[in-house]
Image (spheres, grey):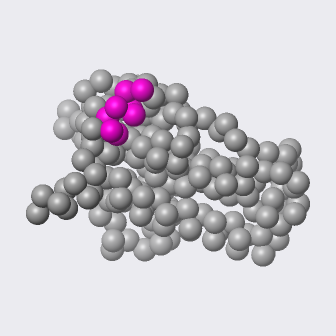
């Protein structure tokens, strides 16, 4: 029972991070929920603008759950290779999104597609330079996600606790929980 409770708690913080960062970046979140098979969850974030900037935001949001897991589990002494393997094993859906957004951004930046939402071949191959650019995009998104997760941790925690109580939050409920979270400045002023 304790293992299921911990997985549910992990899922709540993971999905809360996706949802909170998406809202902080101005994205629409239809809903966020936890439960179902193996007590996992989903944050349903909509891609409304098909622009380079928005795809970069989505790439960042795809790493938000990992960043929350990283903060809660304290993976400081884990190698980059082991972190990558852990991410692939625990976050397959997030990895697919990260790959999708980094592929589209790389092909767009290299001039191989004319806009980030253009059709691409499923078997598209990167040049060595494009692979490096994609890796750099992913690394930048991962680092930015960690910074933003730390910055918005109080809101993420509040949303995670609401998810543990309610299992599902609409965008309005999500926004209300975010608004109720104390800001870092407010907390610092109490010292």
x and y, in percent, of residue 146 in the image: 42, 62
x and y, in percent, of residue 139 in the image: 56, 68
Q: Residue at x 88, y 54 (%)?
A: 114
Asked if residue 118 lies in the magenta stretch, the reply is no
Q: Is residue 144 left or right of residue 186?
A: right
Asked if residue 173 lies in the magenta stretch, the reply is yes
Q: Residue at x 33, y 71 (%)?
A: 76
Q: Which residues are magenta?
A: 172-179
Q: Quadrant of residue 188?
A: bottom left
What is the number of callouts on the image?
0
Q: Is residue 52 left or right of residue 160?
A: right
x and y, in percent, of residue 163 in the image: 32, 31
Q: Quadrant of the N terminus?
A: top left
State the residue in front, 160 or 124: 160
Majority SS type along the magenta span: helix
Residue 73 visible to an observer of this rendering: no
State the residue in front, 89 or 57: 57
In this picture, is 87 found above or below 27? Answer: below
State the residue in front, 57 or 101: 57
Q: Is residue 77 left or right of residue 57?
A: left
Q: Quadrant of residue 20?
A: top left
Residue 136 visible to an observer of this rendering: yes
x and y, in percent, of residue 4 in the image: 27, 35
Q: Residue at x 60, y 63 (%)?
A: 138
Q: Is residue 41 left or right of residue 185?
A: right
User: Residue extending furthest left?
Assistant: 191
Q: Quadrant of the C terminus?
A: bottom left
């Amino acid at each position: 029972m304790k293992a299921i409770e911990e997985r549910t708690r992990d899922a709540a913080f993971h999905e809360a991070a996706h949802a909170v960062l998406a809202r902080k970046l101005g994205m629409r979140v239809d809903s966020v929920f936890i439960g179902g098979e193996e007590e996992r969850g989903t944050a349903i974030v909509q891609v409304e603008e098909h622009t380079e900037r928005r795809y970069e935001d989505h790439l960042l949001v795809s790493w938000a759950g990992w960043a929350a897991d990283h903060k809660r589990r304290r993976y400081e002494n884990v190698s980059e290779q082991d972190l990558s393997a852990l991410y692939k094993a625990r976050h397959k859906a997030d990895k697919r999104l990260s790959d999708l957004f980094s592929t589209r951004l790389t092909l767009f930046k290299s001039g191989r597609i004319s806009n980030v939402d253009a059709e691409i071949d499923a078997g598209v191959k990167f040049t060595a330079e494009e692979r490096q650019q994609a890796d750099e995009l992913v690394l930048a998104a991962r680092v930015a996600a960690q910074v933003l997760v730390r910055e918005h941790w109080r809101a993420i925690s509040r949303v995670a606790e609401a998810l543990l109580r309610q299992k599902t939050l609409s965008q309005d409920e999500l926004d209300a929980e975010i608004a109720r979270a104390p800001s870092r400045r407010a907390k610092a002023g109490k010292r």
